[in-house]
Amino acid sequence: MIALLRGTVWEMDKDKLIVDVNGVGYLLNVPSGKLSSVRIGQEVVLHTYLLVREDDLSLFGFADRQDKELFIKLLSVSGIGPKAALSILSSFSSVQIITALVQENHVMFTEISGIGSKIARRLTLELKEKFKDYHLEGLTGETFAGSESGPGSEPGIMEALLALGFTPGETRTAVNAVGKLEGLTFEEQLREALRLLARA
C-alpha cells in the first residue's frame, strides 16, 4: 500500500496532480480546491490511498491525514464512490463534514451532485456513531475564547460556528437563542446551537 508520497509537482489540474518521486510520475486524484496553493515545481508531501478495483488502480492524495481518513470512511458507505467522496471533501471542510454526520444533517450532503436524499440519510446513519467521540480540531472549549458557560462564552460559540461555515446572520440567531439557556458548558452550548441550525 502506498501511504505517503514526497516529491515534486510535475503537472496539475484542479483535481489531479502528477508528482515526480525520484523520476517516477504518480498520478493522484485530489479534492478540488484543497491544494489550490500548490505550484508546479513545488515539493509536496501527500497522504495517499490506493483504490484497487478489478480493472483499475487509482491513487488519491490528501494534504492531511484527517481528509484521508474521512475519504476512506465515506467510501465504506454503499452508494458513495470515489467521485462522490472527493466531491464531498472538495465542497466542505473536514470539520463541517464530521459535524454534519454527528448532527445527522443529511441535507448538507444533498448539495453534492449525484447524492440524493436516500444516500445522504444512509451516509449520516452509518457514519454518525464512528464520529461521535471524534476530536474535532478547533471545536473544544480550550481552543476558543470564553469557554465557560454563560454570556462570556458567546464569542467562542460565534467563532466556532463561523469556522464551520455558517453565515454571520445564522450564527447570531443561534447564539442569541443559546444565550437564553443557563448552566450549559461550552460544548453543550455549541451542540445546542448546531441542533438549532440544523433545523433551520
Image: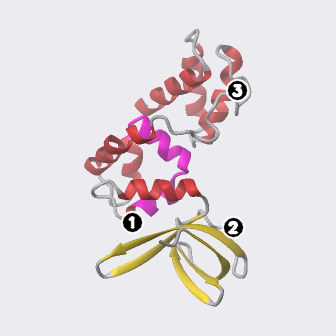
Q: Give, as a three-letter code, the residue at label 2.
A: Ser
Query: Residue 179: x, y in percent?
Result: 60, 16
Q: Which residue is painted at 61% across and 27% down in the image?
A: 172
Q: Secondary structure at mark 3?
A: helix
Q: Which residue is painted at 64% across and 67% down in the image?
A: 36
Q: Is residue 92 shown above or below 136? A: below
Which residue is denoted by mark 2 in the rendering? 37
Q: Which residue is painted at 34% across and 56% down in the image?
A: 76
Q: What is the spatial separation of the Cα atoms under label 1 and label 3, in whole angstroms? A: 38 Å
* Residue sitting farthest toward the left: 118
| Nearer to us: label 1 or label 3 | 1
How many other residues sit within 10 Å of disc 1, few (<14), some (14-19) or many (≥20)?
some
Magenta segment, which residues?
A: 85-105
Which residue is denoted by mark 1 in the rendering? 82
How many other residues sit within 10 Å of disc 3, few (<14), some (14-19) or many (≥20)?
some
Q: What is the spatial separation of the Cα atoms under label 2 and label 3, in whole angstroms? A: 30 Å
Q: Give, as a three-letter code, the residue at label 1.
A: Pro
